Image: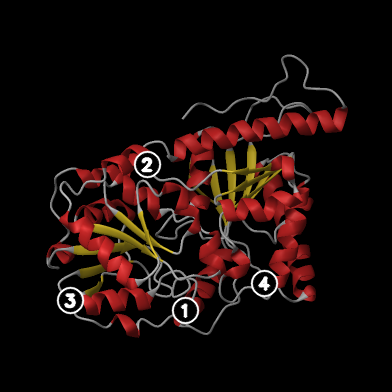
Amino acid sequence: MRNETVRSETTPSHDVVLFSTADWDHPFWTNKQHVAAQLAERGFRVLYVESLGLRRPTVSGRDLTRIGRRLRRAWQSVRQVRENLWVASPLAIPWHDSAMVRRLNDRLLSAWLTRTCRRLGFERPIAWTYNPLAGKLIESLDPSLIVYHAVDDLSAAPHMARATIELAERELAQAADLVLTTSESLQARLIGHNPHATHYLPNVADFDHFSQARSDGLLPADLAAIPAPRIGFVGALSSYKVDFNLIATVARARPDWHWVLIGQVGEGQPETSIAALSLPNVHLLGPQPYAELPNYLRGFDVAAIPCPANDYTRAMFPMKFFEYLAAGRQVVVSNVPALISFGDVCQRVDSPEEFIEVVARMLSASPRVNEAGVQVAARYTWQWRLDQMLLLVDRAWRERQVASHGTSSPTGCAPPRAKAG
């Protein structure tokens, strides 16, 4: 299974250890799984390290189930899930605000990681992390390059060790060879720690997959049973991400409009209450398979991103935005500053009254397909962004060589390029 690429001081590793904040088999893939899968497809060998438990666990059934699953997996060896891609589920004590716990985690996990990389034959891998608390683990790798991909303000999410995460993120950003951010807010916060190495690349979508919503086809039975017009939402149904009060206010004011909410209730926030959504025209359809999402989007008359105003949403760039656009949906958004620059393909609102006014206008428009949005979404694809990332990785590698040796890479020893997407 060894990669036979000849390596030297001037040849970067094609081994990547990716520190995720999500488990590989989570039903809704985000940046972590998509980037790992795409790197593997491009010829990189990737070790995907599942979440180390950033959020303090609660006594909810969901958290206890997840802890049990992690305990079972910890006894398994690293598992290969596709060509060039392995997944590991190490155990970590999730009380990261304790200095003693952090030291114990670092010692045990560093030893585990060294053994795992040796077994896989990984040599001075690229450390690619979404977890700002992975600093000590990264040090143990002696990495050829450090990439920090900041996709959320994790310190602002519920049950997080905020001060610990903020300090660790600052230190990681300063040490990284490359810092990638998915919103202008994250970019503004991190660029001061490492100005030359910090770059903004927004979230993207699988354009081809979600474009299927624009073709003719039958609606899923549970959606077809709901009267139109339908206002739809796909994503985690947690109160720090979704404004339930806005949804309830609009639903009461317009009983002829039906809300369709697809996703896991309480994802990342087990104490979430959906009591406000107990209305006859609000329909919770639960999580749906990724392959089926275009079929659900096909039945949305309007797609919504109704967020509350808080530190987390101020830094987020919702992945669902380009998914909605690829599906040709009209999009209405509240409290997502990252989408201000996309005001020509979505409508931003500040109140339930404005939401009602905008949606009424969208429903009266003909045709309802958001053609301008489709054209924009076609530019923001996973393939496009990975190409941009790898160009930045290539540049960061060359600059690291200059800093280390005082000269650029010799002719004929330039970094090997991954195959085109």
Asked whether disc 1 touches disc 3, contact meaning CB atoms under 8 Å apart, the reply is no
Judging by the rendered image, the residue that carries numbered circle 2 is 377
Mark number for residue 255?
3
3D distance between C-alphas at marks 1 and 3: 29 Å
Q: Quick one: 232 or 116, which is closer to the camera?
A: 232
Label 2 and label 4: CA atoms lie apart by 34 Å
Name the residue at 30% across, 78% down: 248
**1 or 3: tag closer to the N-terminus:** 3
Number of the front mark, 1 or 4: 4
Q: Check disc 1 and report the residue beneath it.
A: 270
Mark 4, other Cα within 10 Å: few <14 / some 14–19 / many ≥20: some
In the picture, residue 214 is in which quadrant? top left
Q: CA distance from mark 3 to mark 4?
A: 41 Å
- Residue 369 x, y percent position in the rendering: 22, 46
Q: Please tell me which of labels 2 and 3 falls first in the chain.
A: 3
In the rendered structure, which amino acid carries the disc numbered 2? Ala
Mark toward the viewer: 1 or 3 = 3
At label 1, which amino acid type do we have?
Pro
193 in relation to 233, above or below: above
Disc 2 packing (10 Å; few <14; some 14–19; many ≥20): many
Image coordinates for residue 286, horizontal then vertical, percent: 30, 69
Residue at the right extreme of this rendering: 406
The amino acid type, in three-letter code, at marker 4 is Arg
